[in-house]
Amino acid sequence: MADENVVFVGKKNIMSYVLAVVTQFNSGVKEVTIKARGKVISRAVDVAEIVRNRFVNDAKVKDVRIMTEELTSEDGSKSKVSAIEIVLGRE
Amino acid sequence: MADENVVFVGKKNIMSYVLAVVTQFNSGVKEVTIKARGKVISRAVDVAEIVRNRFVNDAKVKDVRIMTEELTSEDGSKSKVSAIEIVLGRE
């Protein structure tokens, strides 16, 4: 169930992720988690800030977590990548 | 005084920022704040994770703050940019 309130940010147009988050809030959920890995971490922050400042003014940053994830590529080699989870919530 | 414990991440080699943070901890401070703006936000997360996982194992992420800053360019035009502050602390 928690997964329903997650938006995973990648390389698409940033407004498509903003729209995804806003749509979730408009459907009535109280919290949306924005996740990203690697270089697109900065875009996750952009998404959270745009949602908060322009679309869902009562949304607050409830928590920001940073972590390291291990990825296994097709050839079996492993690499580590930083990740972020930003929890936006409204009262 | 607080400024002494801040490392501002930019486009230099990532290990130079890691070294800056580790040096601060080794000088005896209990907290170091890692800051970045825009696309290098992901590098700030990398710096925090590398410090924590490889160099200062008792360092914990005390706080992560995200925000929007307004920049004024030379021609006077203003633009907004996302920013992050990661506070690492050891007991």
Image (spheres, coloured by chain):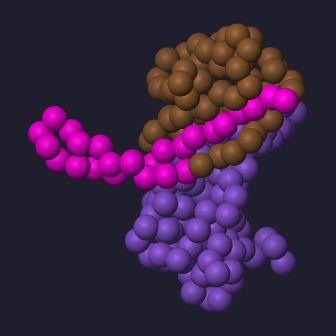
Chain colours: A purple, B brown
Pick whichever, B90 or A28, lies toward us: B90
Which quadrant holds residue A89? bottom right
Compared with A22, A41 (above or below) is: above
Q: Which residue is painted at 32% across and 49% down in the image?
A: B70
Which quadrant holds residue B52? top right
Q: Is residue A32 visible?
A: yes
Is-magenta flag for residue B72?
A: yes
Residue A2 relative to residue B44: left or right = right
Residue A88: x, y in percent?
63, 67
Residue B77: x, y in percent?
17, 47
Q: Which residues are magenta?
A: B66-91
Compared with B37, A27 (above or below) is: below
Q: Is residue A8 visible?
A: no
Which quadrant holds residue B32? top right
Q: Which residue is painted at 68% across and 80% down in the image?
A: A30
How many callouts does the rendering have? Answer: 0
Is-magenta flag for residue B24?
A: no
Residue A31: x, y in percent?
69, 74
- Taken as a whole, is the magenta stretch helix, strand or loop? strand
Residue B15 relative to residue B68: left or right = right
Q: Which residue is painted at 49% across and 68% down in the image?
A: A52
Compared with A40, A75 (above or below) is: above
Q: Which residue is painted at 75% across and 39% down in the image?
A: B61
Quadrant showing the C terminus of chain B: top right
Pick whichever, A16 or A72, lies toward us: A16
Compared with B31, B18 (above or below) is: above
Pick whichever, A78 or B8, lies toward us: B8
Q: Which residue lies most toward the front here?
A: B1
